[in-house]
Image (cartoon, rainbow, N blue to C red):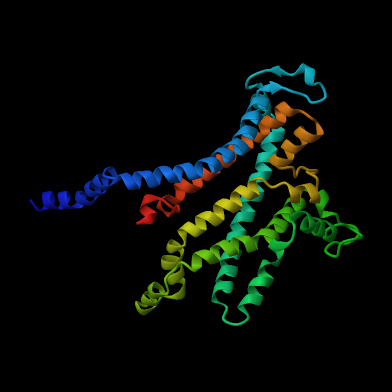
Amino acid sequence: MTAKTEAVTTGEPEVTERKHRKRLSEGARAERRLGWYLCAPAVVVMIAVAAFPIIYAIWLSLQRYDLRFPNEAKFIGFSNYGAVLSSPYWWHALWVTLIITIISVAIEFVLGMALAILMFRTLFWRGAVRTIILIPYGIVTVAAAYGWQYAWTPHIGYLVGPNSAPLTSQGSAIAIIILAEIWKTTPFMALLLMAGLSLVPEDVLQAARVDGATAWQRFYRVTLPLMKPAILVALLFRTLDAFRIFDNIYILTGGGNGTYSVSILGYDNLFRALNLGIGSAISILIFISVAIIATLFIRGFGAAVPGSATGGR
């Protein structure tokens, strides 16, 4: 009897909530319609701006389309996708992209968390500390990449000797690209994580300290779980950005010596080879990869997603 009563009691809020949703007054329905009407122009513009290029890129990817011979364009279905996915150049570019993405984002998360704690806990010269930490992120990526290129160029840079050229070797070049990415974008990661730190209630940390939790236990068992939404945003943004890396590689190596990413591969086919069919197929594959990464992150973090039903209660 107790179990039955408990089950009924547990289900009452949901029933009440459903009834409340169905019994919207005429004024509430009018306000909802007004909200949709006000949002409609912006939604239409966003769909037009975002949807048309995607649909046109999909259409181009289904054709044999060389810009040098536009009159010979021909619909060939999914043959371009088959050509890309069967090419070793695509898989090499994907492998290089994944290496850069995984290593750079992992290191950026650790360093970003340390810098976020430093910026959040600093008592003196807080503004100056935050400004100094955020300086690399304020520099234009192309300008920063040229600085890294000069630093590692023989007879010009101060980080290499006259007889060494690390940017001409695949392993060292990828390492320098990762280093440049970490230097440039760690402040962005730190900024997002610092916003998450500000959401952790101090009274919860004080209660954990009173219960005898060490600093590491408070951080691992209290701070990190409460920061999950901010961590999701930071990791998701940086992973998607790192997966689409282009400018650092383009300036440092130009994609040479086996350092080309999927974006560099797409650029070479679209703008150098003028092969719109293959280039568009590569772009769509990048788009699908980004969508898969975003889905995995959101599902992996589950209730920590901002706006989710569980996270919002």
Q: Position of residue 212 (x, y in %)?
A: 37, 78
Q: Position of residue 171 (x, y in %)?
A: 74, 50
Name which residue lies at 31% across and 44% down: 26
Near-viewer residue (157 or 292): 292
Name which residue lies at 29% across and 46% down: 25
Name which residue lies at 72% across and 34% down: 89
Q: Give the residue furthest to the left.
A: 1
Q: Position of residue 287 (x, y in %)?
A: 61, 38
Name which residue lies at 74% across and 19% down: 73
Q: Position of residue 267 (x, y in %)?
A: 75, 38
Q: How many discs mark residues in the rendered view?
A: 0
Residue 292 seen by the camera: no
Near-viewer residue (106 or 181): 181
Residue 254 horizontal side relative to residue 38, left or right: right
Whether residue 81 is situated above or below residue 207 in the rendered picture? above
Residue 248 seen by the camera: yes
